[in-house]
Amino acid sequence: MALVLVTLSGCTADQGLTSPPSPSIASPAPQPITELYELAAGTVLGTGTFDASTKVPVSGTVEISTDSGRLTLSVLNLDLGPTESTVTLELNALTDDSSAARFRTARSYVADAPVLTTDRQTFDIAAGNGYGDQLITNDPSWMRTAVLWEQVDGITFGRVMATAELVWAVPDMHPDLAVVDSGEVATARGTVIYDSAGNPSGYVVAPQDALETIADRFGITVADLLWLNPMRGWAEARADETINLSRYERGR
């Protein structure tokens, strides 16, 4: 059989037929974005349009963008109507249909100056919160609503003037995240909180627990744990602290 194949091959060459082209080498698949600093400065990550109350005619939009390892928050074409009160801007972890009382319990970022009626006003989210040059997290989409607060004497944080639901275009940087409790181990002996489906949704830290061991207990990394708790920071685990383990509850 081997001789027959050689003979046939020789006949093909004698007939002047060309050899099949070599298979092309496929281009490597693009690597997923794992940090926002990998995105070009000026990349728009989220937007929102203010939905005014029936009493105060407010209009304008917000835009969250990258800026060389920072996040910036811009207010565009803002019209505050006839109000003469000081107005401040916040990004909040709750959805835009929440009450003012609930918004006061889940504050994410508050701009460091009053907002102005202007074409564009930009705030530096990182610097405004004292986080230096680094982003708070590699995924800011836990901030679900932009809230305009009208400052009113005697009312904590003021009165909600208008809200804007934030729509994010952030890639999923933890697509394979799955939280599974493997059971109590040394330095991860806390109490697990379960959701209605029986999945771990929270963890109450026990004395001498460590973030690394807690993450190991649930089959995730410390980076995953910090992503699930975006405002927590890198501090050591504290006894009786509740750590979030749920995507849905992220940042709330």
Image (cartoon, grey):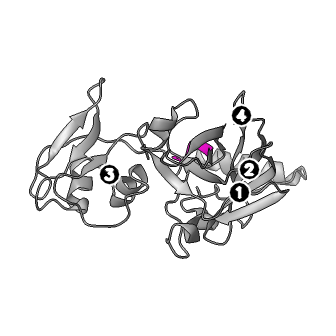
Q: Is residue 187 left or right of residue 103?
A: left
Residue 126 position in % (x across, y down): 56, 67
Q: Residue furthest front?
A: 153
- At horizontal 86% and vertical 53% (from top left) the residue drawn is 18
Pointer 2 local density, CA inside 10 Å: few below 14, some 14–19, many at least 20: few
Pointer 1 local density, CA inside 10 Å: few below 14, some 14–19, many at least 20: many
- At horizontal 19% and vertical 40% (from top left) the residue drawn is 192
Tags 4 and 1 touching, CB below 8 Å: no
Residue 192 sits above or below residue 13 on the image: above
* Front in this rendered view, residue 183 or 104: 104
From the image, state whether disc 4 or disc 2 is nearer to you. 2
- The residue wearing badge 3 is 220
From the image, state whether disc 4 or disc 3 is nearer to you. 4
Residue 93 position in % (x across, y down): 50, 44
How far is disc 4 from disc 1 in space, using C-alphas? Answer: 16 Å
- The residue wearing badge 4 is 51
How far is disc 1 from disc 2 in space, using C-alphas? Answer: 12 Å
Q: Is residue 27 left or right of residue 32?
A: right
Q: Which residues are magenta?
A: 142-148
Q: Amino acid at mark 1?
A: Val
* Front in this rendered view, residue 124 or 169: 124
Badge number at residue 115: 1
- The answer to whether residue 177 is seen in the rendering is yes
